Amino acid sequence: MLISVINLGINNLTSVINSFSKPLNSSDSIEIFDSSSSNSPDLLILPGLGKFSAGMEALQSNEMNYKIIELTNSGTKLVGICLGMQLLAERSAESPNTPGLGLIEGHCDKLPINQGEPVPHIGWESIEISSTNLFPSLSSCRDFYFVHSYHLVAKIKENISGITRFGNGSFISVVQKNNILGVQFHPEKSGQAGIDLVSEIVAWAR
Amino acid sequence: MKYRVIPTLLTDGENIVKGEKFDNWRTIGNAEAISRVYGKRDVDELLLLDVKARLRNTSISPKVMSYFTNNLNVPFSVGGGISSLADAKTCFRSGAEKVVLNTAAILNKDLISEIADVFGTQAVVVSIDFKESVSNKLMINSGKIECIESIEELIHLCELKGAGEFLVQSREKDGTMAGMDHAKIETVRRYTKLPIIASSGAGSLEDFQLAIKSGANAIAAGAIFQFTEVTPKQVSVYLYRNGFEVRKV
């Protein structure tokens, strides 16, 4: 299989590449995906760190946004991580003038500051999983690492496969729609729980 | 929000070193070997500071950061000599999750917004370095120069520019394992709602609990994890037994 990691130019690819390389065997490969990539990957990773507009502008500058949409529409599995999950949405309050990829119906909002929880939200949290979840390691008994100020609000209930408590409320921490998965936390930074999830994602894309 | 226990490692750009009161650095081990040890420990988070970067007229060593990126599966923050957006970019490209700013950001607060505008506020930690326990005097340049701003002004301006978290260090307590300066943690808590990483002086399990009670969201510690048998995991278990929410592994 081929895994392609999208290069936004601002994010750390090393940790993501290291973590997705672990479950691979000798006939598999992992590459950095940019506008010149002509290979057709089995799994496309959209990692992210930073501001919504900076991420989208990086994709738009070499028309990678179109390429991602095209591959995803033709069935390639896509995983958005942190900002990468938010970029799947149609828009974000962080950068109101910059449209997102629009692959998941919904928008991103700032985490509410009236929940008695500090924003940005940094740290280890568990996930309450819906019945549609495909990944056994996403269990409420384990914590994953979050660092974010915005969160995705999905329009379609069926796309929500995990939520995380935040003060008296909650935010969506896992979205899934057919071949698209979005996680608000960082699997590549989530210790053993993250390592387990990454192997399940790789198995899903095989 | 769950409380985090963060081992602090100091580097001179080559090795891992340990000091006392921001001085008297001595080598305690090879950076790559130590990064592997912490990779296996599955800690909550790690803090890596290059204490000699400013002396070398550069920012934290990319080589040392790369060891941690390759061997850790958990987030780490880096600091030491970061003076420009380009320096910060190098850190994020090297795999760090957050940058810790002190001298450059306190002298030029716009550096905070420059970095936060590209990488988000959660990626910017400002280190507040207290000079001594008897006053609220602040230091910059690895504790060498006294800072003219008051603690209140400094916190306010840093928040305004987009700091996402504060690291609270006390030079007098650094490396001593003699207990933390809880009054300073409380002082910083009084002026901010942002997450606080309390550092300097943790020498017993109880110190971690006291830091939380003073307002810390995370506690960073070096000496106790290097010179005693206490491990970060033991601290988390202790906190959990005392009613504080910590990470589930």
Image (cartoon, rainbow, N blue to C red):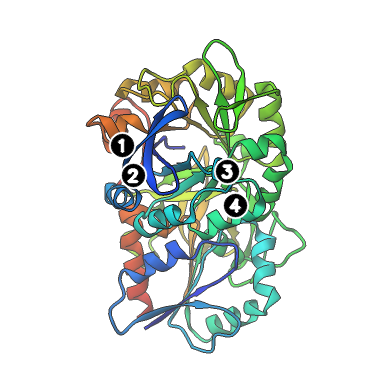
Residue drawn at (31%, 51%), measured in percent from left and top?
B39
Q: CA distance from mark 1 to mark 4?
A: 28 Å
Decide if residue A31 is in sight here.
yes
Q: Position of residue B243 (x, y in %)?
A: 34, 27
Mark positioned earlier in the residue sequence (4 or 2)? 2
Establish if B35 lies above or below A40. Answer: above
User: For mark 4, what is the residue?
Assistant: B88
Mark positioned earlier in the residue sequence (3 or 4)? 3
Numbered disc 2: what chain? Answer: B
Q: Residues within 10 Å of mark 2 (few under 14, many from 20)?
A: many
Q: CA distance from mark 1 to mark 2?
A: 7 Å
Numbered disc 4: what chain? Answer: B
Q: Residues within 10 Å of mark 1 (few under 14, many from 20)?
A: many
Nearer the observer, disc 4 or disc 2? Answer: 4
Mark positioned earlier in the residue sequence (2 or 3)? 2
Q: CA distance from mark 4 to mark 2?
A: 24 Å
